């Protein structure tokens, strides 16, 4: 019986927080206060991420979290890593997309958006707050996610007006443009313009953001 190969992981290491992101699985990315805790969190979220992969028509083996291979360690920043977002581009992110890879990452991004939409629609309007009353309610999180995606679109060369949270045709048009832009990366265009994002990093960040807030809504929907 062939053993499951280790899952390649990128670590982004800040002073207070470490992100562990599965390199080949956009959206499967979690954080912790140390490398060990970040990898433990990544493994713990495999059962929540696997349905997203299935929705994309892919199979994420249950053994994918049995062993991780750290391919890159990136220095994080206070403004992104410690604040709570994976903000660093890995060297491997500049590799051009192989045949079929753009289709694969597009499917995972779209599955992440679909998961977010399903969870948000099923959630109560008001979410459980923290011990000091902090946190956003469902509509506020939806607005935040849509607004962030308009900002992400600019990072891949698009200029899309921010859709209103309830304007489904406009949201669909923006997301279709994002998918189209990510799929158009040519081999000689692996390096984006200054301040821009290569396709691999853009996929990782976009899918992570949608799923991170989907799971936030899910976790705060209970009593």
Image: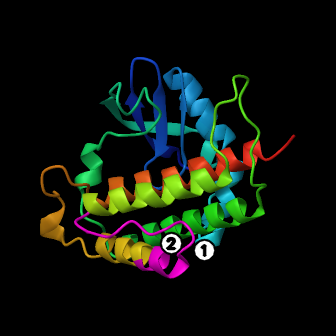
Q: What range of the chain is rendered magenta?
A: 156-173
Q: Residue furthest top?
A: 15
Look at 29% across and 73% down and name the residue there.
Answer: 181
Number of numbered discs present? 2
* Predominant SS along the magenta part: loop
Residue 193 visible at all: yes
Report which residue position mark 1 lands on: 57
State the image quarter where residue 177 is shown.
Answer: bottom left
Residue 97 x %, y %: 30, 67
Q: Tell me if mark 2 has few (under 14), some (14-19) or many (20+) residues whose alpha carbon lies within 10 angstroms of its own.
A: many
Residue 58 x %, y %: 59, 69
Nearest to N terminus: mark 1 or mark 2: 1
Look at 37% across and 62% down and name the residue there.
Answer: 150
Quarter in which the C terminus is drawn: top right
The secondary structure type at the circle numbered 2 is helix
196 left or right of 70? left
- Mark 1 and mark 2 residues within 8 Å of each other at the beta carbon: yes
Quarter in which the N terminus is drawn: bottom right
Q: Residue furthest right?
A: 223
Q: Residue 170 magenta-drawn? A: yes
- For the residues labelled 1 and 2, the Cα–Cα distance comes to 8 Å
Which numbered marker is on residue 107?
A: 2
Look at 72% across and 65% down and name the residue there.
Answer: 121
Q: Which of 54 and 31 is in front in this view?
A: 31
């Amino acid at each position: 019986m062939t053993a499951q190969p280790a899952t390649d992981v990128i670590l982004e290491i800040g002073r207070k927080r470490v992100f562990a992101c599965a390199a080949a699985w956009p959206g499967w990315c979690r954080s912790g206060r140390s490398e060990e805790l970040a990898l433990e969190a990544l493994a713990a979220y495999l059962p929540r991420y696997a349905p997203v992969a299935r929705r994309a028509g892919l199979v994420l083996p249950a053994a994918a979290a049995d062993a991780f291979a750290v391919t890159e360690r990136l220095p994080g920043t206070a403004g992104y890593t410690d604040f709570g977002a994976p903000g660093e581009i890995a060297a491997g992110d500049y590799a051009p997309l192989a045949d079929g890879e753009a289709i694969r990452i597009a499917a995972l991004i779209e599955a992440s958006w679909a998961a977010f939409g399903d969870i948000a629609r099923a959630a109560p309007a008001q979410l459980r707050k923290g011990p000091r009353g902090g946190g956003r309610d469902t509509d506020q999180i939806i607005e935040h996610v849509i607004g962030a995606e308009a900002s992400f679109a600019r990072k891949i060369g698009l200029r899309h007006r921010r859709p209103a949270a309830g304007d489904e045709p406009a949201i669909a048009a923006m997301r279709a443009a994002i998918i189209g832009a990510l799929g158009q990366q040519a081999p000689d265009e692996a390096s984006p313009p200054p301040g821009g994002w290569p396709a691999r990093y853009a996929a990782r960040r976009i899918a992570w953001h949608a799923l991170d807030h989907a799971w936030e809504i899910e976790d705060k929907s209970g009593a």
